[in-house]
Amino acid sequence: MHTFQTVPIEKLDMNPFEKIGKQWALVTAGDEKQCNTMTVSWGGVGVLWGKNVVYIFIRDSRYTKEFIDQGDTFSMAFLGEEYRQALSFCGAHSGRDTDKFAQAGLTLAFQNGIPYPDEAEMVFFCRKLAAVPVDKDTFTDPEILPKWYGDGDMHTMYVGEILQVFGR
C-alpha cells in the first residue's frame, strides 16, 4: 500500500485539460466482491448544485457502467506517465473478459469501500449525484453525432460529488 495524504480540495492544483484530456484517468466502481475499472479521457471538475464535483462520460456498452449504475460511489484516479500502458490496456479491454487490474499490473485498493488503483498519484473519491443520458436529439452541432456516435453507442454523463481527495 502506498501512503496517501488527504488533500484539501481548496488546495488542489491541477489542470483538468491536461489531467483528464491528455493524461487520462481510471474510473473504478463496485465493491470488494466485484468491481471494474476503465480509462476515461472525457470529463471535468467544477462546482454544481453547491458541491465540488467531477463529471465523466461512460458509453452504454461499457462494463464499468453497470457498476456505476448499481452503486452510489466511484473513484477517479490519476496515474503517472509510467502507467500509460496500463491506462491503454484498461481502455481497450473489457472487465467482462479479464481481470483488468491484474492484467494491467495494478493493485486494487479500497478507501471507505470505494475501489481505486493503489498506484495512483491522486484519487477523487466520489458519491454519484446524477446519471444523465446523452440523447441524440439534444445536440445542436450537427457534426458531433456522426463523428462520435455513428455506431449508436451513446454516453451517460455521471456527476459525482468529490467526497475526498487523496494525493502523494
Image: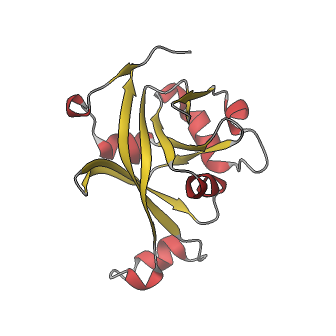
Compared across the picture, whether 159 is left or right of 33 comes to left
The image shows a total of numbered marks equal to 0
Instruction: Name the residue at 60% across, 56% down.
Output: 70
Question: Residue 6 falls in which quadrant of the image?
Answer: top left
Instruction: Name the residue at 63% across, 28% down.
Output: 106
Q: In which quarter of the image is the N terminus?
A: top right
Up the image or down, 157 lies above or below 8; here it is: below
Residue 89 lies, in percent from the top left, at: 65, 41
Question: Residue 113 falls in which quadrant of the image?
Answer: top right
Up the image or down, 103 lies above or below 96; here it is: above
Q: Nearer the viewer, residue 91 or 134?
A: 134
Colour approach in the figure:
secondary structure
Q: Which of 13 and 75 is in front in this view?
A: 75
Q: Which of 6 and 107 is in front in this view?
A: 6
Compared across the picture, whether 88 is left or right of 124 comes to right
Residue 19 lies, in percent from the top left, at: 37, 40
